[in-house]
Image (tube, rainbow, N blue to C red):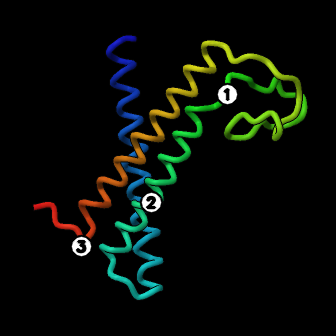
């Protein structure tokens, strides 16, 4: 892997993390104000929730079985389930496994980052 590809990938990862954090923060503030909650607490709870969801999706995406659907019956779904997509079964090749592990790492790392940012923003937790 070249340095340019690594820098471009890290730039995309950072952009996705920032965009996700900002979007969750804006939606959390709006919902918090509608419910009469403190904006900092609303943002932290939103980041906790979305971060936890990202970690769960990342774990499930990483532990997918080595059997994939060949298609034929529709979309296989986010987890590549044979039950959801139908079609014939095939063994996952090297690219499928690398994609599963890569996407799992992205989801888990961004989820953990959102949780850490939520802890930093939460008015109920004191870091110092």
Q: Is residue 103 left or right of residue 2?
A: right
Residue 97 in percent (x, y) is at 59, 20
Give the quarter of the image for residue 70. Answer: top right
Q: Is residue 49 above or below residue 71?
A: below
The residue under label 2 is: 23
- Front disc: 2 or 3: 3
Q: Is residue 114 above or below residue 30?
A: above
Label at residue 120 = none
Of 63 and 12, the residue lying toward us: 63
**Mark 2 or mark 1: which comes first in sequence?**
2
Kind of element beneath mark 2: helix
Disc 3: which residue: 123
Q: Quadrant of residue 10?
A: top left
From the image, tell me which residue sits under label 1. 65
Identify the residue at horizontal 33%, vertical 24% (top origin). Answer: 7
Residue 39: image location, x then y, percent: 33, 77
Say few, some or many: other residues with alpha carbon within 10 Å of mark 2 (under 14 / 14 to 19 / 20 or more).
Answer: few
For marks 3 and 1, give the CA distance. Answer: 41 Å
Q: Residue at x 61, y 16 (%)?
A: 95
The residue drawn where x is 40% and y is 11% is: 1
Task: Name the residue furthest left.
Answer: 128
């Amino acid at each position: 892997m070249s340095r340019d590809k690594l820098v471009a990938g890290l730039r995309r990862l950072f952009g996705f993390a920032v965009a996700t954090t900002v979007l969750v923060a804006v939606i959390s503030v709006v919902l918090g104000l509608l419910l009469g909650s403190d904006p900092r607490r609303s943002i932290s709870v939103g980041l906790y929730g979305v971060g936890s969801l990202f970690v769960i999706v990342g774990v499930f995406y990483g532990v997918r079985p080595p059997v994939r659907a060949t298609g034929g019956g529709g979309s296989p779904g986010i987890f590549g389930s044979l039950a959801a997509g139908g079609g014939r079964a095939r063994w996952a090749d090297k690219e499928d496994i690398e994609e599963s592990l890569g996407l799992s790492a992205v989801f888990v790392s961004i989820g953990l980052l959102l949780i850490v940012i939520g802890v930093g923003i939460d008015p109920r937790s004191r870091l110092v």
